[in-house]
Image (cartoon, rainbow, N blue to C red):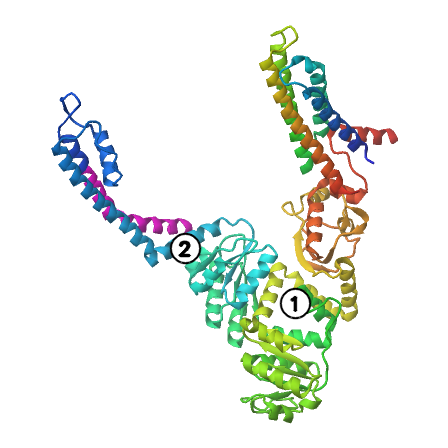
Amino acid sequence: MAATSELDRVSMLVLRYMRAPVFILILVYAIGITGMSLIPGYDADGNVHYMNLFHSFYFFTYTATTTGYGEIPYEFTDEQRLWAILCVYMGVVAWLYAIGSIFRLVQNPHFLLALNEHRFTGRVRRIHRPFYILCGFGDTGSLLARGLSDHWLRSVIIDVDPERIKALQLRDYRVSMPGLCADPSAPKYLQDAGVQMPNCKAVVILTVDEEINLQIAVMARLLNPDIHILCRSTSESHTEHLRSLGQVTIINPFEIFAQLLSMAITAPRLHNLNSCLVHNPNVELGKPMLLPTGNWIICGYGRMGQWLYRHFVLNGIKPVIIDPLAQEVEGAAQVIASHANRATLEQAGIASAAGVVAGTDNDHDNLSIVMHVKAMNPDIFTIVRQNRHENQIAFDAASADLVLQSSLTTARRVLKHLISPQVQQFLDYLREQGEDICEHTVHRLRQLIGDQQPHLWHCVIRDEEASAVTEYLRNGNQLSLGELRRDPHRLDGCLAAMAFTIRRDGKCLMLPADNESIRLGDDILFCGTQSGENMLLASMNNVYTLDYLVSGRDKARGYLFRWLEQRGEKGMT
Amino acid sequence: MNLERVVFGFVIILALAFTLAFVVGDIHNASHHNVWMLTIAILINLIATGLKLGDRSQVGALLLASSLVADVLLITARIIWVTAENETAIGPSRESMANIISLSSGALVAGIITVVILVGDTLISRR
């Protein structure tokens, strides 16, 4: 519906704009052609000859456009030439007017807007695979789009800033990502972006303004009651409101930081695995970073500082707080209401502290805190908050032990959700199970993928994704996970693909064993390498390969040999 | 070792060999080309096509397609030979002979493609 109304709008605009020029062109052509046909001329023998309408039209067509092929079919008389002069001037002026109108229309910003919207709607309607709507293409949005593209996931992007949409068009994504410059909180544009299409899987809302985020979430929920919404929100009241919408995943980067920090303290191996799964380049799988548990100093007690503080206290650490606006804080070892500088750091006991968090909302302050701290206590563990992505180089140079970057954390969390909600469930499961299970999992994963980066993907046992497997299962055969994971090049080996979870009948089976049998409709989350994914996909979609994996011998392919094989089997029995 | 692969490989390569044996020689000269060779090439190609029926893999579909191309071209060549058999004392005229050999060369290309696919598939599976 939206597509046709948009099309109507564009064609209506063109027609309305071209009404006067087209009318004048028709009039000029009519006058010129009629006159040319009515003025008598002479043929080669001197007989009177009237040009027929077709010849007049032909003559007018090439004179009006100033092409000019000469006088046809016979040389003109002076009367005819006079009329021809008139024709040329009239025609040229009429054409200039018409072409000028077209140019004016094309340069009209409203027309361009309508045209862009029309094009965007068309591109969205042609997406037949699952896709996500991304509202807000700032630091977080562009990081997320890059991650989605790396996993061959499509998204449709809306942002208010025209510069960002222009930047989007220059990105080299693996999949097409249509972008529209518009206000995403307007329901019309959400509809254009395909929020009501059945293959739209989720709306991701990442603009900087929390109020607008809430509005977009409400609009999306109204337009599509079933759609999953992922929304960035850091304030209590908005979070409350968002939760009431139902099916909303709230992404609070500060809370995620704090959870990650908590994880780094209590479950360093899991923290290491998690960092590798989200492709953190500074982390090596199986080499966890150990956070010291002595005295900590938190510089900056804003939203992030408060979250971190809460989780420090949960883990039995009582940090010192340095913040000019800090009031009395319950459970804190000491509160220093001042800016973090040499004197206050000294006062906080930097010399004997185990770690420091530079967590203000100003990147320069954070960097200078890190520099001071490193000078005063070179062995201290430093955690620094990076607010802006463009300061990356400075933060790399500061070489803090842990950098917390809001946009990156948000993008990674959303990406994990979009790849599969099972990823987070699996990590939560490992957290509950404790470090031994986690270490065992990491060990198995390392055996499969070596030093390569782990790659996550999920696949559902259905005809579109695993045609050979569904056929095999429908024929009443049993297939186990271990058989599926066999390497077709050498049957005793196995592919670089490890099953993390199987989702079946709404329940999640964690770390399934190799003898677990596969059933129709299973949603399996794998971790391995890209080539592992390709090989596994090939096995799952080729009946002969699958048969070979299970039976260990090549089945006859042609009718003749299959018949011979069956006869042979009968002869045996 | 897989019996089906052995038999199929044998038939495919034999078909290619016979097609080549027929095509080799002066394109206009009927005495350089033996009609029996052509007939046997057709027969072996048809057998190869029959062996590949029922294979549902991508490679199988491609092999079937290319051997169908060879069948069509060789049978057309044989029909031209039948119609042109009595044009001269030794068989088809120079023009008809050129047509027959051109068509058979097409079949030769299809045969080469079949063999290349077969060898490629065998090398990739590395079992």
Whether residue A190 is situated above or below residue A212 in the rendered picture = above
Give the amino acid at mark 1: Asn
Magenta stretch, main secondary structure, is helix
Give the position of the C terminus of chain A as an image quadrant.
top right
Query: Of label 2 and label 1, which has the lower sequence position?
Result: 2
Q: Position of residue A493 (x, y in %)?
A: 80, 51
Q: Position of residue A400 (x, y in %)?
A: 65, 78
| Label 1 chain ID | A
Q: On screen, B45 above or below A263? A: above
Q: Residues under labels 2 and 1: Cα distance?
A: 37 Å
User: Residue A356's x, y, as percent?
Assistant: 65, 83
Q: Secondary structure at mark 1?
A: loop
Secondary structure beneath dot 2 equals helix
At x 64%, y 24%, the residue is B105
Instruction: Point out the stretch of residues depicted in magenta.
Output: A1-30
Q: Taking the image as drawn, is residue A36 in sight?
A: yes
Using residue A24 as the reference point, say whether residue A157 is left or right of it.
Answer: right
Mark closer to the observer (2, 1): 1
The reply to whether the magenta stretch includes residue A247 is: no
Q: Residue at x 62, y 83 (%)?
A: A371
Kindly identify the residue that appears in the image at 78 percent across and 67 percent down.
A439
The residue to which callout 1 is attached is: A280
Q: Nearer the viewer, residue A570 or B37?
A: B37
Residue found farthest to the front? B26
The disc at residue A117 is 2
Under mark 2, the amino acid is Glu
Front residue of A44 and A474: A44
Q: Quadrant of residue A174?
A: bottom right
Q: Nearer the viewer, residue A125 or B78?
A: B78
